[in-house]
Amino acid sequence: MSKVRESPAATGGAAAILLRYLRDQNRPHSAQDAFGNLQREHGLGKTAVVKALEQLAQQGKIREKAYGKQKIYFPDQDQFPTMSDSELKALDNEISELSSKVQTLQQSCRHMESELKDLNGSMTTPEMIKEIEELKKDCASYTEKLERIKSAANHVTPEEKEKVYNEKKLYCKEWRRRKRMATELLDAILEGYPKSKKQFFEEVGIETDEDYNVTLPVAV
């Protein structure tokens, strides 16, 4: 496959673009930097950029400095007027003001990004309307169910509820008393029994609440 050669006209056009770009930027660039920044706007090829930079350096229009295998190109600083201390100070003040503006804008961007994130996580108006309609349906269903319970002829009266509650307390109290008595009796027997408690229970056929995962309700 033959190599594609850049024409002198293409190299010359690239040189003009690169010279203007380097002067405007006034900072060091590698050939890759210049290619990456100008390729999209001007459609420059990598080979044209490299040749144009070398040509400009040979003509003395820009400076070239090698760092290992890489070359850095930058405009000749002699072409720029020397600035006085007051001008440098003014530039420093301008840089400080611009830096402050950048920080303010960055904070504003972060704040807006946070608001956007909250908004994206919130429900849209159609979604809220749909959710409200679903809740209204649920409320109507629960209201209807409650009315049926209230109007039922066989619902539990407060007196019946109190009676059941008292009976539960009585039975739990008796359960607790009998369990305590049985435990004390069994402990007395086990004091003279030569085997373990488990073996005794198995031989006698005693079943405990724990065997059936039954828990005695807490006294109120």
Image (cartoon, rainbow, N blue to C red):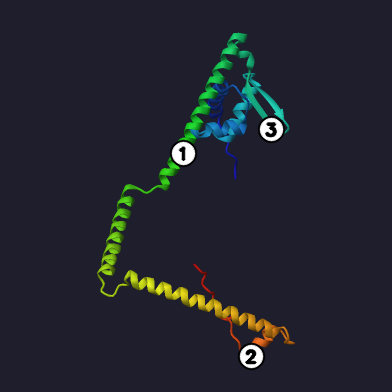
Identify which residue, 34 or 26, lies in the foreground. 26
Q: Kindly identify which residue carries mark 2.
A: 204
Q: Residues within 10 Å of mark 2 (few under 14, many from 20)?
A: few
The residue shown at (63%, 20%) is 59
Whole-percent x, y for residue 174 in the image: 51, 78
* Screen quadrant of the N terminus: top right
The residue shown at (55%, 31%) is 7
Whole-percent x, y for residue 81 in the image: 60, 11
Q: State which tag comes first along the sequence, 3 or 2.
A: 3
Judged from the image, the secondary structure of the residue bearing numbered disc 1 is helix
The residue shown at (43%, 76%) is 167
The residue mark sitting in front, 3 or 2, is: 2
Relative to residue 116, is residue 63 drawn left or right?
right
> Spatial distance from mark 2 to mark 1, Cα to Cα?
75 Å
Whole-percent x, y for residue 35 in the image: 57, 33
Q: Kindly identify which residue carries mark 1.
A: 113
Q: Residues within 10 Å of mark 3 (few under 14, many from 20)?
A: few
Q: Kindly identify which residue carries mark 3.
A: 70
Judged from the image, the secondary structure of the residue bearing numbered disc 3 is strand
Mark 1 and 3 residues: CB-CB less than 8 Å, in contact? no
Identify which residue, 32 or 89, lies in the foreground. 89
Mark 3 and 2 residues: CB-CB less than 8 Å, in contact? no
The residue shown at (57%, 15%) is 91
Image position of 131 with respect to 104: above or below: below
